Amino acid sequence: MRLHEGVPVPHLHSMVGLTTAGSTAKAIQHHRMGHTPRPVWLDPALAMAPTSVHWPASTTHKMPDTVRALTAFRAGFCTQWVCQHEKQAIPMTMVPGNKHDPDYERPINSRYVDPCEVIWLATAARLGLHIRRSPLVFSATDGTGRLQLSTRDDLDEDDCLAQMLLHEICHWCTNGVETYGDRDWGFALDGPTDHREHSALRLQAWLADQVGLRSMFGPTGVYRQYYDRIPVDPCAVIDDSDWEKAVVKQAKEAIARMQIKPWHPHVLQAMKATARLREVVDPFLSEYASEVEDDALPSLWGT
């Protein structure tokens, strides 16, 4: 029993079989509040019975109530009459000594990285890509394996490294392995829309379908409107236009390439690992609460 907590006075009778009024109650209250830094028999506030302090064990019930109460409380303390810390109930004389150096600076020996990002950063490295962040771009490659992605503060709430990297990998695979050395996979970014853009989205949908995460791995840019129109069969045309025929033809070739080196088995392994993370997170999603004030958006893991 800790000194600063004590025992509620109304419960004393049931605990130690004594009355809870007069000098007894006052003695207990002084102990509970930590107001007795010296032996209680020196406290003038306590009215001690003018009788002998020695009683046979068989006549314990005849002890004055004050003495019986203090005896009961004494059994619960290891440091009787030692001043206690107001909040922690430890003797004020207890100090850690040299166990805490006030000039200590904790060494930082590791960096926390989201588990999903660990998977995809490792996948990038396996494919010969390395990721860097820049506020000047959304995504860009320089033809050396360096892939720049926008800084986290400049991305949308549903942007994530896994989806952004997968999209770039799909561009590379769709445009051909040789475009690894081309800036932005050979796209002319200031030109008209290239049909290979839509082919890469179909490859992206096919990969996501292998693990049932098409929505989660959807692009977050302007091409999301096309991605959401891709049929259940990612190689089925939306209409009979020449555009769609060219898009699907290129997508089928890309799907075939994705299943050979250098992309296989790394990309599918990352997709499957992400799906396993989704299974781990799933039981917690119903009780997920955002740390962002008034955030009504659900977790991307639940999409």
Image (cartoon, rainbow, N blue to C red):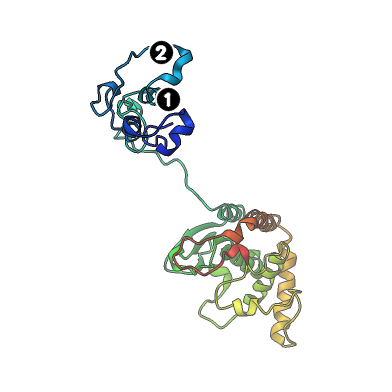
Tag 2: amino acid: Trp
285, above or below 58, in the image: below
Q: Which quarter shows the N terminus?
A: top left
Figure disc tally = 2
Which residue is located at x 75 percent, y 87 percent?
A: 240
Q: Closer to the camera: disc 1 or disc 2?
A: 2
Which residue is located at x 69 percent, y 73 percent?
A: 202
Give the labeled residue for mark 2.
55
Q: Position of residue 108 (x, y in %)?
A: 42, 41
Tag 1: amino acid: Ala
Q: CA distance from mark 1 to mark 2?
A: 16 Å
Q: Position of residue 247 (x, y in %)?
A: 69, 79
Q: Is residue 180 visible?
A: no
Q: Position of residue 194 (x, y in %)?
A: 61, 79
Q: Helix or strand or loop: what does disc 2 sit on?
A: loop
177, above or below 123, in the image: below
Q: Is residue 85 left or right of residue 160?
A: left
- Quadrant assignment, res 31: top left
| Numbered label attached to residue 72 | 1
Q: Which is more toward the observer, 157 or 6?
A: 6
- Quadrant assignment, res 204: bottom right
Mark 2 nearby-residue class (10 Å; few <14, some 14–19, many ≥20):
few
Q: Tell me which label, 1 or 2, sits earlier in the chain.
A: 2
Q: Position of residue 56 (x, y in %)?
A: 44, 11
Q: Helix or strand or loop: what does disc 1 sit on?
A: helix
Q: Residue furthest bottom?
A: 241
Q: Is residue 171 visible?
A: yes
Q: Is residue 266 left or right of residue 110?
A: right
